[in-house]
């Protein structure tokens, strides 16, 4: 009753106030006044709080008539005020839980607005492949094909647009990282937990990072010390007796200086021979990998700087089960192989942004790397030591306004190779390569539906000569939620024919280089043009978010260092391309969020990769023409303390693949002309118990498909026909693993 | 001696006057622009860039501020506000004409302040 009287009094009072002041009262559902409720004009800082009677007085705003009333534990109200007095009833919030309106972030993002066809794989995507290093991170991404490890070294090469990794520029924070000597195993020397994100650019890349990229660019970012958590631990163990440990220790010394120490170790100590070919299915060995990363951030003065110091030592032993390196190395007692790699790297990058001009900046990158591999494969020996220095200075600014941006700069690279090959011949291929180049890249954006990146660089390389590398990218949004992209560009590179084809050392093939005029092992530099067109349409299908991605890319080689294993099964020939060589790829992708938290991705890929060999124009061997990929990912809603389940299944189907010619071998050592199609399924379950602890469990190749005859003449590996390089499928059957992740935040 | 002091003083005043007149080539300014959505953002930024001397323009839908970097020798923030008002968006300084406002796309018809 008193309340009602108070109400009446309150309304009566209103008339006494001037027009400019808003008076009001805030009550709860039981008509009790709320003391201390926030009342303010929307989008302003003008506001007040209610007194013990729940009343307030607030000057009217000239900017808005939209009033916000909030009180902890109650639902916030927004009211458009038309009179000079109001009474507001706040409803009690159902629970006191924090309400977050969010959309589950996609694990892989494809932008509608970037000029280049870039996919960004975030940490969430990277966690889907729990094991273990960068070479295995791409198994859930349809744009990258992960080859099956070769039967002896267990190494996995990746392919993009039908071309192997030497044609992809692989960079660590835009510094070329996997190149030259590290081409074969480099990706396996980057532990997966170190990686913050991966950017995959299809087609001609940017001119900023060099002239070498032909089919695309893969850049990976390492975790930044300034954002990192104090401690991270990952333990992994698998059925094939592989054990991995990753620990990160982060320390923030001040608000400007922070550092992370990354420690990684892995070992495989159990000998497995699941397919009973007397050979180890995967090499045994161990790796120690240490990275100390420092970050200096001075936002006020626009300075960011990173310093990385890294050491890695990797030892692998492969071959027959009873091979003992101490007694059998480089003898015919037993066939075996050891590959020992040591890597030292120091790199620094510093960026400076002009404080009054956020669009203008300098960047300076310097990197020194030493990569030393000593190895033998049966009686073949291969040693390579590459010392390189890379430096890049770049300047970003605008022409009249930020619709017109440019990047220009110079870079320098120096590579000293000590390379020794002992196969059917012994030769020292040691050499020094250096190059200096300048680049300019212009970006135009009409802020609406069109943008363009046009770049060119001029380089002088002691073996490749002086040449120009042009690249062009165009983006156009023809209508809502759609984008068309086109790209064209030229790439040129020096093929490291031995480092890139190391799997061939694990065979009894004779190596022959048929040309002698060129400056690179007698061969000429490789030159290719890449053209691409892609289209993305996002739409709603029965209310669900869906997208279609179509793309077509073509690479035409003008010059190529052809690796011919077809002419003769006892020989590998390297020669300059004489005729046509191209790779055409078409990909159609369809992705949909079926229900909340359940995402389905599927894609079909068609490859037509042909090269003119001495024996004729042939489809690329060990390359499926048709591939199909599907991925289903489900996660439960995250509960209060972070508890969550995540499920992920990937299905990969490969069509028939041409096998290299083995017709002249005795029948027992012949392969079919084609390997028939097969499918591989990987799955993983993650259980998060809290925001600091989770465990995961998964299986690879659950269907247990195994390639038969992975090694030709496996019973007599010193015989004429021995070859372990003809791998088109998994040689190891189903494999299960489990692990845990622990964080201190 | 007095003359000397006078000369020094006069010249100092001269310098300070000059310093006041010196216009920044990269002046950061911000002001309120009414708008709602992504379409508004494009329209507002395009209008800002149409003014010669605007080097960077970013409008934020969440708080309604436009952040500009302008060359003060070539334009002023009022020039930019005028250009934005001309395409239908009210600014802190200048209001848009009703006729232009009414022609905006439905989702861009922001709440106007009388």
Image (spheres, rainbow, N blue to C red):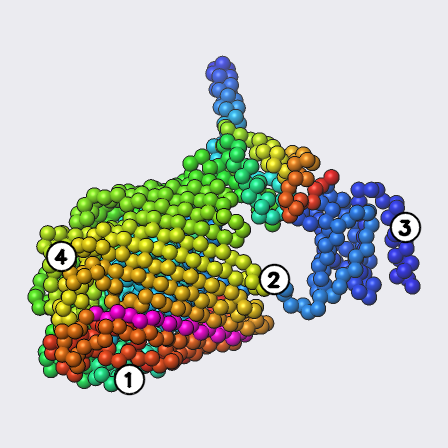
Cα distance between the residues tagged 3 and 2 = 41 Å
Give residue A12's mark: 3
Front tag of 2 and 1? 1
Label 1 marks a residue whose chain is A
Q: Is mark 2 on a helix, strand or loop?
A: loop
Check the picture and name the quadrant holding the N terminus of chain A. bottom right
From the top left corner, tell me how far across and down residue A639 is, in percent.
Answer: 58, 72
Query: Residues at marks 1 and 4, common chain?
Result: yes
Q: Which of marks 3 and 1 is nearer the N terminus?
A: 3
A477 horizontally vs A393: left or right: right
Cα distance between the residues tagged 3 and 1 = 91 Å
The residue beneath circle 1 is A274
* The one of A436 and B86 positioned closer to us in this rendering: B86
From the top left corner, tell me how far across and down residue A82 is, in percent.
Answer: 79, 47
Label 4 marks a residue whose chain is A
Q: Is mark 4 on a helix, strand or loop?
A: loop
Density class for disc 3 (Cα within 10 Å; few <14, some 14-19, many ≥20) is: few
Cα distance between the residues tagged 2 and 1 = 50 Å
Q: What stretch is highlighted in magenta?
A: A643-660
Cα distance between the residues tagged 3 and 4 = 99 Å
Q: Do the residues labelled 4 and 2 touch (CB within 8 Å)?
A: no
Give residue A101's mark: 2
Residue A470 lies, with reference to residue A158, above or below; the image says above
């Amino acid at each position: 009753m008193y309340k009602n009287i108070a109400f009446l009094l309150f309304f009566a009072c209103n008339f006494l106030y001037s027009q400019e002041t808003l008076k009001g009262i805030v009550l709860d559902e039981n008509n009790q006044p709320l003391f201390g409720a926030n009342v303010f004009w929307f989008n302003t800082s003008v506001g007040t709080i209610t007194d013990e009677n729940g009343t307030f007085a607030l000057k009217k705003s000239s900017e808005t008539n939209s009033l916000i009333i909030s009180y902890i534990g109650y639902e916030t109200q927004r009211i458009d005020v038309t009179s000079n007095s109001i009474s507001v009833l706040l409803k009690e919030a159902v629970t006191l839980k924090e309400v977050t309106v969010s959309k589950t972030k996609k694990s892989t993002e494809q932008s509608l607005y970037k000029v280049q066809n870039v996919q960004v794989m975030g940490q969430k995507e990277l966690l889907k492949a729990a094991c273990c290093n960068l070479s295995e991170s791409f198994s859930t991404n349809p744009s990258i094909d992960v080859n099956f490890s070769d039967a002896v070294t267990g190494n996995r090469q990746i392919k993009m647009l039908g071309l192997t990794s030497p044609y992809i520029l692989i960079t660590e924070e835009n510094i070329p990282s996997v190149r030259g000597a590290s081409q074969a195993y480099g990706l396996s020397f980057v532990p997966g937990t170190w990686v913050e994100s991966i950017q995959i650019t299809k087609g001609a890349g940017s001119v900023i990072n060099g002239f070498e990229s032909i089919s695309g660019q893969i850049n990976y970012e390492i975790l930044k010390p300034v954002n990192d958590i104090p401690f991270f631990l990952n333990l992994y163990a698998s059925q094939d007796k592989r054990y991995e440990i990753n620990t990160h220790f982060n320390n923030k010394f001040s608000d400007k200086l922070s550092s992370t120490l990354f420690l990684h170790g892995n070992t495989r100590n159990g000998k497995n021979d699941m397919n009973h070919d007397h050979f180890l299915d995967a090499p045994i060995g161990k790796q120690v990998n240490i990275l100390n990363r420092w970050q200096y951030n001075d936002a006020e003065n626009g300075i960011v700087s990173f310093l990385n110091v890294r050491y890695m030592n990797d030892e692998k032993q492969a071959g027959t089960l009873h091979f003992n390196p101490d007694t059998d190395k480089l003898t015919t007692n037993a066939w075996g192989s050891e590959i020992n790699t040591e890597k030292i790297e120091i790199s620094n990058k510093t960026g400076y942004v002009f404080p009054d001009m956020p669009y203008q900046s300098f960047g300076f990158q310097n990197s020194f790397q030493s990569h030393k591999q000593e190895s033998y494969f049966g009686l073949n020996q291969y040693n390579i030591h590459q010392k390189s220095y890379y430096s890049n200075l770049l300047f970003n600014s605008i022409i009249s306004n930020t619709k017109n941006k440019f990047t220009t700069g110079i870079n320098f690279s120096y590579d000293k190779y000590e390379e020794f090959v002992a196969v059917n011949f012994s030769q020292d291929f040691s050499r020094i390569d250096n190059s200096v180049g300048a680049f300019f890249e212009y970006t135009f954006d009409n802020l609406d539906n069109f943008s363009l990146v046009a770049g060119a660089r001029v380089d002088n390389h002691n073996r490749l000569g002086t040449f120009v590398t042009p690249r062009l990218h165009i983006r156009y949004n023809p209508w809502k939620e759609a984008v068309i992209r086109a790209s064209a560009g030229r790439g040129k590179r020096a093929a490291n024919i031995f480092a890139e084809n190391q799997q061939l050392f694990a065979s009894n093939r004779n190596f022959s280089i048929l040309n002698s005029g060129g400056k690179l092992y007698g061969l000429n530099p490789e030159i290719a043009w890449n053209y691409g067109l892609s289209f993305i349409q996002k739409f709603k299908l029965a209310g669900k978010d869906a997208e279609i991605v179509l793309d077509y890319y073509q690479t035409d080689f003008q010059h190529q260092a052809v690796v011919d294993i077809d002419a003769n099964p006892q020989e590998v020939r390297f020669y300059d391309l004489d005729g046509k060589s191209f790779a055409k790829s078409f990909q159609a992708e369809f992705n949909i969020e079926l229900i909340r938290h359940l995402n389905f991705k599927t894609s079909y890929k068609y490859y037509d990769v042909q090269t003119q060999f001495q024996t004729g124009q042939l489809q690329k061997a060990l390359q499926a023409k048709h591939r199909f990929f599907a991925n289903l990912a489900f996660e439960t809603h995250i509960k209060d303390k972070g508890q969550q389940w995540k499920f992920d299944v990937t299905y990969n189907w490969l069509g028939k693949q041409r096998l290299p010619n083995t017709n002249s071998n005795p029948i027992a050592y012949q392969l079919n002309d084609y390997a028939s199609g097969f499918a591989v399924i990987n799955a993983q379950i993650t259980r998060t118990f809290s925001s600091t602890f989770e465990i995961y469990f998964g299986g690879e190749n659950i269907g247990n498909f195994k390639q038969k005859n992975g090694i030709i003449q496996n019973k007599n590996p010193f015989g004429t026909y021995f070859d372990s390089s003809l791998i088109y499928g998994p040689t190891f059957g189903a494999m299960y693993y489990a692990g845990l992740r622990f964080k201190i935040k | 001696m007095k003359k000397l002091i006078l000369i020094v003083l006069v010249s100092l005043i001269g310098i300070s006057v000059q310093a006041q007149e010196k216009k920044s080539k990269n002046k950061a300014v911000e002001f309120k622009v009414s708008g709602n959505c992504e379409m508004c953002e494009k329209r507002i930024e395009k209008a800002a860039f149409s003014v010669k001397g605007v080097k960077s323009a970013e409008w934020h839908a969440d708080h309604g501020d436009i952040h500009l970097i302008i060359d003060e020798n070539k334009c002023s923030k009022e020039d930019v506000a005028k250009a934005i008002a001309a395409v239908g968006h009210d600014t802190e300084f200048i209001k848009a004409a009703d006729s232009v406002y009414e022609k905006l796309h439905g989702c861009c018809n922001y709440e106007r302040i009388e």
